[in-house]
Amino acid sequence: MLLCPVNSSTLVSVLFLLLPQAALARWACVRACPSSCTCTQERSCSVLCDRSALAELPKEFPCEASSINVDKNRLKFLSERAFGTLPSLRSLSLDHNNISFITPGAFKGLPNLVDLKMAHNEYISYLHTRTFTGLKKLVRVDMSDCNLFNIPDRIFLEQISLREVRCFQNHFRRIPGAFRDMVNLTHIYLEKNKIEAVAYNSLLGLSNLRYLNLEDNRINVIHDQSFQDLLRLENFYLNDNLLSVLPQDTFKGLSRLKMLNLGGNLLTNVSKTWFSDLVELEVLYLDRNRLLTIEEGSFENLTSLITLHLNSNNLTALPFPVFQPVYFLGRLYLFKNPWECGCSLEWLKEWMESYQLVRNIPCASPSSVAGLDLGEVVFGRANGSCVEPPELNATAASTAAPSTTENRFNSLIARLLQQELQDGTGNGTEGFRNETLLDPEEALLSAAARGQGVRSGPSHIYLLVAGILLGLSGRTEIGFHVFGT
Ligand SMILES: *[C@@H]1O[C@H](CO)[C@@H](O)[C@H](O)[C@H]1NC(C)=O
Ligand SMILES: *[C@@H]1O[C@H](CO)[C@@H](O)[C@H](O)[C@H]1NC(C)=O
Ligand SMILES: *[C@@H]1O[C@H](CO)[C@@H](O)[C@H](O)[C@H]1NC(C)=O
Ligand SMILES: *[C@@H]1O[C@H](CO)[C@@H](O)[C@H](O)[C@H]1NC(C)=O
Ligand SMILES: *[C@@H]1O[C@H](CO)[C@@H](O)[C@H](O)[C@H]1NC(C)=O
Ligand SMILES: *[C@@H]1O[C@H](CO)[C@@H](O)[C@H](O)[C@H]1NC(C)=O
Ligand SMILES: *[C@@H]1O[C@H](CO)[C@@H](O)[C@H](O)[C@H]1NC(C)=O
Ligand SMILES: *[C@@H]1O[C@H](CO)[C@@H](O)[C@H](O)[C@H]1NC(C)=O
Ligand SMILES: *[C@@H]1O[C@H](CO)[C@@H](O)[C@H](O)[C@H]1NC(C)=O
């Protein structure tokens, strides 16, 4: 057992009388420096033993050591009291070793340790309940990227000051019970584990938690009221899980929440009750889900919202009442959705123009505007009200009458035109014209002549040929619509 030597030797006593305090401390720190380490005494005594190919810990550390770094060595094992008695030690780092076993009581003798890092030790698959015995002042512990499947429920029994626990990139299948009722915890990092569900009692009593990261797990169930005690939570990562539904009251009471990330899940529907209490929420991620509907009023109480990510979903419509009365949004991300750019989105276009807040809203339908950005769509007006952009429908033209020569031509023309329009709409065409009941021949020729929205190419020629044939076969009335300037 290693013990920190007390100032008992005569030599030390004599020096203590002769030297100034700082010089004495420097001497003491360096004097006891292990051979494979470097020790420096600035404001406190630091011991650096990283990258030294150590297979075992040095026999002794300076008694005054305030921080010890043994990162990137080949340690395999920590025995009981592995560091002896170091009453001044506040920070200990054992990252990137090959530790596979930590004897219970390994850290005894470090009563003032605040920071303990043992991340990236890929063979630690088990920790004993008494692993952290004696660490009564521990504030932060990092066990990320080890090989842990769980930690014992009572492992932090003595660590009443613990605030931050980093456990990301392990194999946890549930949230460790060890966190329950740890009132002083403020940060929990559990991303990149294999957690499948959040039980109603997993996070009970964590009333000071500010940061919870559950990103990149396999969570498909969140039980009702699971987060009810997290009343001070500010940053919450639930993205990249397998959530398809959430209980109505999931985030109830989380009125301090500033950032909520629900991106990369399987949600199809945003319920209006989810965000009712999130009055301080500034950033909301709902991107990369399968959203088809957003209930009216869903964002109603998000009066602090600055950024909303709705990109990469299956949304076709975004009714204005969904946003009421969110008066201000800094950024609204809507790209990668099959937007239906009809009159119901006219408000959004106006909003885009007024506030320059939204960009990149590609239209998927109606076909006359497919491929355009909403910003490029010009809504027609009749008696002051918006006219829906037309749906170009190849079959509509031919369903009316039996198969006459004219109708076959008509449907051919309509099909060709539609194809041309869809092909040619990549570039910003300023608008479209409702040319229903126009003489087809004239419409064709005028469309061809304008050349906008109708690209030149082989089918362009077919159009003209078809138009001439149609002209020969007599005049008829069909309905279709072309882009125009
Ligand atoms: C690390 O430890 C494991 C298991 O204890 C062992 O199989 C492996 O060879 C060790 N790796 C190194 C680099 O020492
Ligand atoms: C939280 O910290 C305070 C002060 O350090 C301590 O008295 C209390 O016991 C701690 N609570 C828990 C549940 O650990
Ligand atoms: C959305 O979900 C809520 C509750 O989960 C449900 O009541 C509502 O009917 C759903 N709406 C749609 C359009 O699916
Ligand atoms: C918004 O907050 C008010 C007051 O807390 C509440 O009555 C209302 O139901 C909330 N709206 C929604 C859509 O949840
Ligand atoms: C959502 O869109 C994806 C790809 O765009 C598609 O594969 C999926 O079927 C759509 N889901 C629903 C429910 O419409
Ligand atoms: C436009 O308004 C005029 C006069 O109010 C009315 O006669 C006409 O039917 C309206 N047209 C349409 C398309 O609503
Ligand atoms: C095109 O105009 C006609 C008559 O002016 C109208 O009946 C029809 O609804 C319009 N179509 C569209 C899609 O606006
Ligand atoms: C085309 O028109 C037909 C008949 O009006 C309708 O049944 C069909 O759904 C339409 N197709 C599209 C893509 O709008
Ligand atoms: C659209 O066409 C105009 C002129 O026809 C050209 O200047 C512009 O670069 C094109 N834009 C795109 C995105 O292709």
Image (cartoon, grey):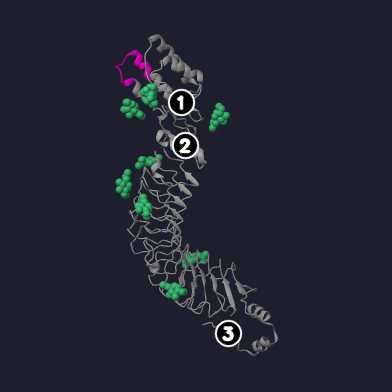
Report the Cα–Cα distance between label 3 and label 2: 76 Å
Please rate how many residues cluster around mark 3, counting C-alpha atoms within 10 Å: few if below 14, some from 14 to 19, many from 20: few
* Residue nearest the viewer, comparing 389 with 71: 389
**Residue most extreme to the left:** 402
Write the start and end of the magenta stretch as one range.
398-411
Q: Which mark is residue 225?
A: none
Please rate how many residues cluster around mark 2, counting C-alpha atoms within 10 Å: few if below 14, some from 14 to 19, many from 20: many
**Residue most extreme to the bottom:** 10
Can you identify the residue that label 2 sits on?
Answer: 349
Classify 24 as above or below 52.
below
* Residue at 46%, 26% in the rendered image: 432
The kind of residue tagged 3 is Pro
Can you identify the residue that label 3 sits on?
Answer: 5
On the picture, is 291 further left or further right than 452?
A: left
Q: Are marks 2 and 1 in contact (CB under 8 Å)?
A: no
Can you see residue 103?
Answer: no
**Circle nearer the N terminus (1, 3):** 3
Magenta stretch contains residue 306: no
Can you identify the residue that label 1 sits on?
Answer: 432
Magenta stretch: helix, strand or loop mostly? helix
* Residue nearest the viewer, comparing 193 with 296: 296
Magenta stretch contains residue 410: yes
Please rate how many residues cluster around mark 1, counting C-alpha atoms within 10 Å: few if below 14, some from 14 to 19, many from 20: many
The kind of residue tagged 1 is Phe
Report the Cα–Cα distance between label 1 and label 3: 89 Å
